[in-house]
Image (cartoon, rainbow, N blue to C red):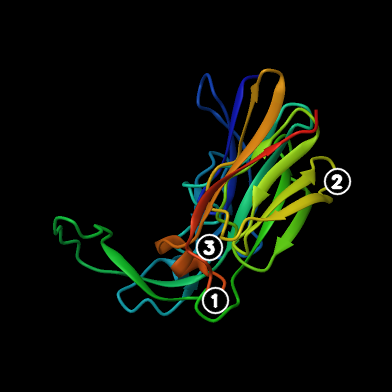
Amino acid sequence: MKALAQPNRNGFLYVIDRTSGKFLHGSQYVEHLNWAKGLDENGRPIVDPKYVPQEEGKEWICPGAPGGKNSSYTAAYSPVTKLMYVPVIESCMQMKKASAMFIQGIPFWGGGWNGSQGDDGTAYGHFSAIDTTTGAVKWSHKEKYPLLGGTLATGGGLVFTGNQEGHVKAFDDATGKVLWQFQAGASVRGQPATYKIRGRQYIAVPSGGGGIIAAVAGEPPLASKGSALIVFALPQ
């Protein structure tokens, strides 16, 4: 079967038939999710009315506005392991609704948030390998801060990502063991990429902190905002 899998910002991983769009199955991939009680047989969330945003915005809603995995940062799938590798944000927010008024150049959200668990240091992240056929988490590597960098899976059994403390990391794709890491000097927020030139393989990783997602989801204090593209070459 030709399938499509997506770890949605709402905290659920969806798997659908990519030729027909039929919902196959879904599962929760974040550790903290309260806005829905699960998914129905059609994949629609069973919303808990207690956590629908109100004008007061007093309830802590999980995941928060940045999502369980922000759409700006990719997950990766390996056809070898049949696992999806997901950089996860664990952060809750008090979200409120308001009248939507469009002002050019100003974010058009129709609401906002009163606070974030990123503000008090309780937000964190994890890098999780999910079996897309069952939704089960095979392994998970916890991080002190939400993960806001992309992911690269290779045919050589490695998965690359980076954290907000500036470490580029390579994991064993089957076990989740950290095999190698490098301090990039600033948060890893971009997408790792690999390529070959004249038979030699390279791994390129962009780094650089800052941005609204990091500010509201949670970031290290005094994080460097510098940016660089760091390239590593495999041994000849």
Q: Split into 4 quadrants, where in the image is the N terminus?
A: top right
Residue where numbered disc 2 is placed: 175
Amino acid tagged 1: Pro
Toward which corner of the image does residue 13 lie, by quadrant? top right
Seen at 65% across and 38% down, the residue is 152
Measure how far apart labels 3 and 2 are at the Cα level: 26 Å
Amino acid tagged 3: Pro
- In the picture, measured across the screen, residue 208 lies left or right of residue 85, that is left
Tell me whether circle 3 and circle 2 mark residues in contact (CB < 8 Å): no
Measure how far apart labels 1 and 3 are at the Cα level: 22 Å
Residue 42 appears at what percent x and percent y?
A: 53, 38
How many discs appear?
Answer: 3
Look at the numbered disc 1 and give the secondary structure of its residue: loop
Residue where numbered disc 3 is placed: 63
Look at the numbered disc 3 and give the secondary structure of its residue: loop
Seen at 78% across and 46% down, the residue is 171
